[in-house]
Amino acid sequence: MKEHKIEAIVHICELAELSEEDQQLVEAAKKATEGSYAPYSKFLVGAAARLQDGTIVTGANQENAAYPSGLCAERTALFAAGAQHPDQPVVALAIAARKGRQFLARPISPCGACRQVISGVEDRYGVPIRIMLYGTEGILVSDGISPLLPLRFVDEDMR
Ligand code: THU
């Protein structure tokens, strides 16, 4: 059996190291947590997607008494972007989470289902999405979903 090594490179930086537009997107994700409806987990997540033309579309997690019927912030934002601006590729996505007023020190990473949807949006437009996961102690930046979802299933696999 041959070993196949998979490498994933991400970057960790401070807010000030990001470009102005990326800083703005992170701030939009933080602000988006205000739209979270999380009476069950009390875990407030915000996401902000920047489109190619600069438009920012935000989302926040929406919970439901039937737990699996709720939706994460990332998919709320990406599906809203797709529905409202179908012709605009998503080029960047920032995510922020807090418990109460306090944003988390270490960033959270999108769940598996959200990673798959991010991958699908990349494939839809053929444009990699820069992902920024906000934490007060540092921001994790991934250029595209690939480092977060290696060996992913893509549209191409069905052809
Ligand atoms: N959640 C998100 O919105 N995004 C993530 O990346 C992780 C989890 C939400 C789902 C649920 O409302 C709450 O956080 C707890 O899992």
Image: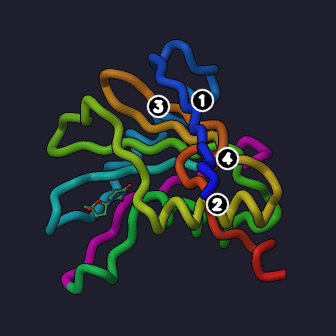
Which residue was labeled with disc 3? 140
Q: In the rendered structure, are the residues bearing label 2 and label 3 in contact, judged by CB atoms less than 8 Å apart?
A: no
Q: Position of residue 6 (x, y in %)?
A: 60, 44
> Image quarter for residue 143?
top right
Q: Which residue is mark 4?
A: 129
Q: Is residue 14 above or below residue 24?
A: above
- Ligand 1 position by quadrant: bottom left
Q: Is residue 37 left or right of residue 20?
A: left
Q: For numbered disc 2, what is the local secondary structure?
A: helix
Q: Secondary structure at mark 3?
A: strand
Q: Is residue 114 magenta?
A: no
The region drawn magenta spans 50-65
- First in sequence: mark 4 vs mark 1: 1
Identify whether 17 is placed above or below 80.
above
Circles 4 and 1: CB atoms closer than 8 Å = no
Q: Earlier in the sequence, mark 2 or mark 1?
A: 1
**Viewer-side residue, 119 vs 101:** 119
Q: Give the residue at x 33% y 69%.
A: 62
**C-alpha gap between disc 4 and disc 3:** 14 Å
